[in-house]
């Protein structure tokens, strides 16, 4: 999988969510490898968004995202934006932050 990250405020990530959704619909056999999650950053409005994609050609739809290695992904996430959380592709990489 290919990974990228980018910081957004509020709902500024939404065009990329829409792109991810379209890619999943256009490539249904690869749905397990399309992942978008976020973690909260400094300031209430900011979050870091991570996208996982099946291969390099899909990264072109995510301009401004910095490539990251899988070892740089957060293990604990705040929000699942889009993914099948029941798959090994997701469960082997992420856990949800426990809220009290």
Image (cartoon, rainbow, N blue to C red):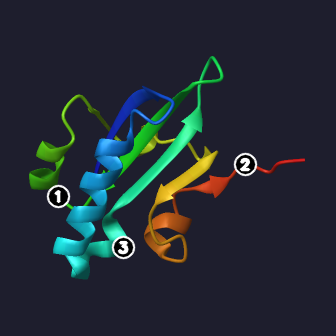
Q: Give how far across and how far down residue 82 sits, in percent.
A: 44, 60
Residue beneath the point at 42% across and 27% down? 7
Asked which secondary structure carries label 1, the reply is: loop
Disc 3 to disc 1, how far (Cα)? 12 Å
SS of the residue under disc 2: loop
Query: Which of pointers 2 and 3 lies earlier in the amino acid sequence?
Result: 3
Q: Residues within 10 Å of mark 2 (few under 14, many from 20)?
A: few
In this view, the residue farthest toward the top is 43
Relative height, residue 94 to residue 26 (above, below): above
Give residue 14's position: percent from left, percent from top. Answer: 37, 43
Query: In this rendering, is residue 12 above or below 30?
Result: above
Q: Position of residue 51 (x, y in %)?
A: 36, 48
Image quarter of residue 58 = bottom left
Name the residue rendered at 24%, 79% in the picture.
28
Q: CA distance from mark 2 to mark 3?
A: 22 Å
Disc number at residue 97? 2
Q: CA distance from mark 1 to mark 2?
A: 28 Å
Tell how many labels: 3
Q: Which residue is mark 1?
A: 55
Q: Quadrant of residue 5?
A: top left
Residue position for label 3: 32
User: In the displayed structure, does residue 76 sit left or right of residue 73?
Assistant: right
For the N terminus, the image quarter is bottom left
Q: Who is closer to the viewer here, 64 or 9?
A: 9
């Amino acid at each position: 999988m290919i990974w990228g990250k980018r910081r957004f405020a509020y709902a500024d990530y939404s065009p990329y969510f829409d792109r991810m959704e379209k890619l999943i619909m256009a490539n249904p056999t690869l749905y397990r490898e399309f992942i978008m999650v976020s973690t909260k950053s400094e300031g209430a409005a900011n979050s870091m968004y991570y996208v996982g994609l099946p291969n390099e050609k899909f990264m072109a739809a995510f301009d401004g995202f910095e490539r990251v290695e899988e070892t740089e992904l957060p293990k604990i996430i705040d929000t699942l934006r889009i993914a099948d959380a029941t798959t090994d592709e997701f469960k082997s990489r992420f856990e949800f932050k426990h809220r009290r």
